[in-house]
Image (cartoon, rainbow, N blue to C red):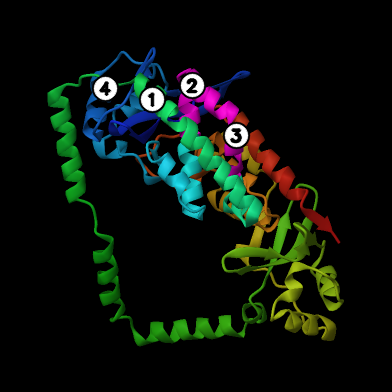
Amino acid sequence: MAGDIVPIELGLTQGDLVTLWVPRWHEGDDEWQAFLGQEDDLYGFTSVADLAAFIRTDTDNDLVEHPAWGVLSGLSAAELEPEENFSFDLVGVPELAANDPEDLVVSKLEDALNMARNLGEACDLDVVNKFFNANQVLDALSAGVDAFEGRDGEDLWSEIGTAIAKGWDDVLDAVDAVVATPEVDAEAVAIAEAELVAADENTVDVDDVVEEAEEDAEFVSLDADEGEDEESEEVEESFWGEVGVDPIKIITAGETYFTLRCYLDEEAIFLGRDGMIFVFTSERALARFLADNHEHALAGLSTYEQIQVAAVDGSLEVEVTDGNVYVLPGLADDLAAGPKSVDADQLDLAVELITDAADFAGDKSVEADLATSTPLGWYVSFILDPDPTRLAPSAPFNAEAEAWRVLEREFEARLRNT
């Protein structure tokens, strides 16, 4: 019926305001999203305490009929503080666009623009909607920082900056015009403020925990040290550990495949080329392929010759560790059934594999599809990053399951059975 209700922070002309956002959800053939407000007003509050007080005392707003509203009103004020990735600095968009297109700049700019687009659609802001419809160049941000490399990339980034410089003030004015801050009960605000103070005082300092752990480490027994040394020696003796490449096993609905993958500067590189991944139906078939000379992305590794020599002399053993076994069948059905039906470890590995394959192909669309601003991304993040203070997603999950199936099909299209 509906998605989560998410606390967010908006950086507007009048300052930083907190409000609530319901990401897109599907109801029949219709797609919806909403913000906290009433009729034409978007409600924004200068503090989390004010927002908490309003939620607890108000029964006349557009979200009060939402199935999760009752749960929301029972949360502590600290649980209503927007997470870092749900802070959108709309007033800072021109400054972001004036910077060089680095990873953080591009991602923050994309997030801010996406939220502005959401506001335009949900609040029927013609000025905002026309701005995005007239500036399709802004869609290039979803491709990531790679889209802005070279002369053409510099020109593209310049086009985005020009579009924002010309029209962003009107966008901000349109959003500012619908923002309203209703009065809230002073006593309820005081209670919420006290909760926030108490929560802050009870927050554990990470540095203190690390220091304490380091002190405890000094008392680790000699036997434990010896055990760790033995484990380290085993890792060092592993052939695949020495060459820095991992055999992986991929189980799809139709077949089980084997291939290789490594990471260079945190970038995934597979046995394959041109974005395609070479896969084999047995370890022996993979070893036979490695014994011959072929053109592929791993051939340029400094350690690849060791792999080929071992394949030629017959000593190569393709051994897949548990952490490199990826099982795709059943995930979509489990996602459709609800969060409790999903094996989080299986999903986490599948996300890793699908995003690694997309990165190898230079495809940024998967990263965008799994962003927390999308229904699927929000659903997946709820499962992989459990938080008892977070509202559970609401059924049905058919749209999210279908979106996952699309990602699986796109991934399998990257596999070349060799």
Separation of residues labelled 2 and 3 (CA atoms): 31 Å
Q: Which residue is tagged 2?
A: 127
Which residue matches tag 1? 173
The numbered mark, 4 or 1, whose residue comes first in the sequence reads 1
- The image quadrant where one finds the C terminus is bottom right
Mark 4, residue position: 181
The image position of residue 75, as x and y in percent, is 29, 33
Q: Of residues 405 and 7, which is closer to you in this image? A: 7
Q: Is residue 86 left or right of residue 347?
A: left
Q: What secondary structure is found at the residue carrying circle 4? A: loop
The stretch in magenta equals 114-142
Whether tag 2 and tag 1 are in contact, CB under 8 A, the answer is yes
Q: Nearer the viewer, residue 72 or 24?
A: 24
Q: Amino acid at mark 2?
A: Val
Name the dominant secondary structure of the magenta segment.
Answer: helix
Left or right of residue 277, residue 264 in this image: left
Badge 2: residue crowd in 10 Å (few <14, some 14–19, many ≥20): some
